[in-house]
Amino acid sequence: MTTQTARFNKVIEAFDSYNSKDINLEMVEGVSIPKELLYAQRMSKKLLEFSPEASEWLQLAARCQHIGRWEISRSNYPMDKKGYFQWRNAEKIHHANIASTILKENGYQDADIDKVVILVTKQGLHNNTETQILEDVVCLVFLEFYFEDFAKKHEDAKLVDILRKTMKKMSPEGLQSASSIPLSPKSKALLQEAATKS
């Protein structure tokens, strides 16, 4: 194992250790798993399915996409659209700060850390190829693992609007991958309706 590979593996372990502290749990095949640990593992798996040649920085960014997410409550911000975006922006900075500390502790230099921060904070979407890949993976993970439960809590019109906005953020390759995700007939219909409006 090279020094670089050992360093990368240590950081992945550190990211997972941090996310293991999430008190919110999900049941998967009878096993209770911290929510953000599970999300991080799903992100890594989906990234390598979607982009097998993903760079080290992109793999790191995918693994820490939601690191420590539970530490900033949505209720700390106004429960409106503006408050939602304030919360999301605060979360991005939070994720980047935690990741930066872990990367530095494991020997990554500032220039390398900056590459991960740019990706985690989604800078250059539609212009930066790796940022776009990460956004595609975020959307694909949402559609595959979280949309069905999310859909049970909202009206169809709102779901179509959310899907339309999600699809606008995706690349043609991402949209192609989304079309093969196994969804319920109703969710597929909503996705198709959103596609006609995007």
Image (cartoon, grey):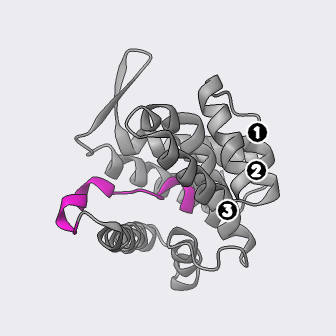
Kindly identify which residue carries mark 3.
Answer: 168
Amino acid type assigned to the residue bearing label 3 in the image: Lys
User: For this view, does 123 lie left or right of residue 16?
Assistant: right
Q: Mark 2 or mark 3: which comes first in sequence? A: 3
Kindly identify which residue carries mark 1.
Answer: 179
Q: Residue at x 27, y 53 (%)?
A: 70
Q: Position of residue 180 (x, y in %)?
A: 76, 34
Disc 2 or disc 3, which is closer to the eye? Answer: 3
Q: Residue at x 50, y 73 (%)?
A: 121
Kindly identify which residue carries mark 2.
Answer: 175
Amino acid type assigned to the residue bearing label 1 in the image: Ser
At mark 2, the secondary structure is: helix
- Asked if labels 2 and 1 touch by Cβ distance under 8 angstroms, the answer is yes
At mark 1, the secondary structure is: loop
At mark 3, the secondary structure is: helix
Which image quarter: residue 112?
Answer: bottom right
Which image quarter: residue 82?
Answer: bottom left
- Asked if labels 3 and 1 touch by Cβ distance under 8 angstroms, the answer is no
